[in-house]
Image (cartoon, grey):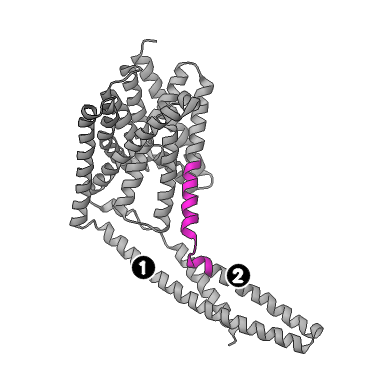
Amino acid sequence: MDASQDGWEEADVLTVKADAAAAEPEPPSPTSTMPAYVVYASICAFAYAGVLLRQLLRLFLSEYGGALAASIGHGFLLQNVAGCFAMGWLKQRERSVGGPPLLLKGLTTGLCGCLTTFASWQLAVGLQLRAGNVGSALLIVALQQAVARSALLAGADLQHWAGSRGRPGDHDAALVAALKELGSVEASIAASKGALGESFAAELAGRYNRTSAELAEASRSAAQLADEMSEARCARLQLSEAQRRGPSEPNARMWLAIFAAASVAAWAAALLADRLVGGGAWAFWLPVAVAPAGAALRHALSSLNGKLDLPMGTLGANVLGSTATAAVYALGGSEPSALAQAASIGFCGSLSTVSTYMTDAQALEQAGEKAGGVRAWLYVVGSVALSQVAVAVVLISLTDD
């Protein structure tokens, strides 16, 4: 058997291996069978960080945001964009290379979920509708929906690009393409014998044979690398199986310790900041301190996702958070107390989420060409419409004007 035939057979082996790897089903979420208290600990620990970042961005926008941020609101636009970008990055990384399940759960559900807020967005829309500014309300809806979706896709694309550089699969594809090109070169050599003379054609054929042999050797090395990658994938799946059985006791204690340390730090800042710093520091830190309560309730409601083929848990959390935020606003007035801000920014803001909302919509859209798209639009429109109905009822019932 000549070298070119060896190259073609090795290329076929690589193609079969690639097709088999692509056909393997994705393993279930490793956190689905872990102890619930450990999962909640990871989510709640990162919930503090999510609301803290949201508060810092709110202060930054109130100082430097300009007229657009002032007209729309300082509490949600940039925060939702940043959280959706991070969510897209993390979800793409989770799909491509995986990672520590509890860490990814904390970063996605805890940090990104609490950095973004569906409730503040819907309150801003409801206030514009209440004032008769229908055009402004529609602009806020469309602008937030568009930029959040773009940020989610941008994060996923950037992580895919960063993670795909230098992968062996890319070199395998290039190798297969090179072997196919050699087939056309061989035909050209055969045609050139009569026209160019035996001596030149023989020299060209010799170069071709040497190149073909080198590529065949490279193909065999790539096949060996593919075998090693397959073994590594099996090892990763075995690790995932071990992770699905639950974290080890030291790992569980670690997450409980992280949550406890974050809780002590957040509440210490909330209780001591106003005394030591003043200037409304209590109103800044108290929403951070109560963030885990909203994040934990949102995660509990996520068990309803999949009902009626829709993410009903996320939808319910967003509608409930929007309703409660409108009630706090109606009762607290234009200058809410620190407790009112803790309820609206901390609890309701963490209960509702734009990052998971956008991720769910994208997943529904990709589930099927037509049915998936219909469910995605039903979910998006239903989330906004139900929230606006609830916000309108609350504002009409609890306000005098």
Q: Mark 2 = which residue?
A: 177
Question: What amino acid is at disc 1?
Answer: Cys
Q: Main secondary structure of the magenta part?
A: helix
Q: On the image, which quarter does residue 191 sit in?
A: bottom right
Question: What amino acid is at disc 2?
Answer: Ala
- Answer left or right for 229 relative to 374: left
Q: Quadrant of the C terminus?
A: top left
Image point (26%, 24%), residue name? 339
Element class at badge 2 = helix
Residue 56 in picture, x, y percent from top left:
36, 34
Q: Mark 1 = which residue?
A: 234
Most extreme residue toward the front, as rendered?
276
Q: Quadrant of the N terminus?
A: bottom right
Image point (47%, 63%), residue name? 22
Image point (36%, 58%), residue name? 27
User: Front-most of 334 and 105?
Assistant: 334
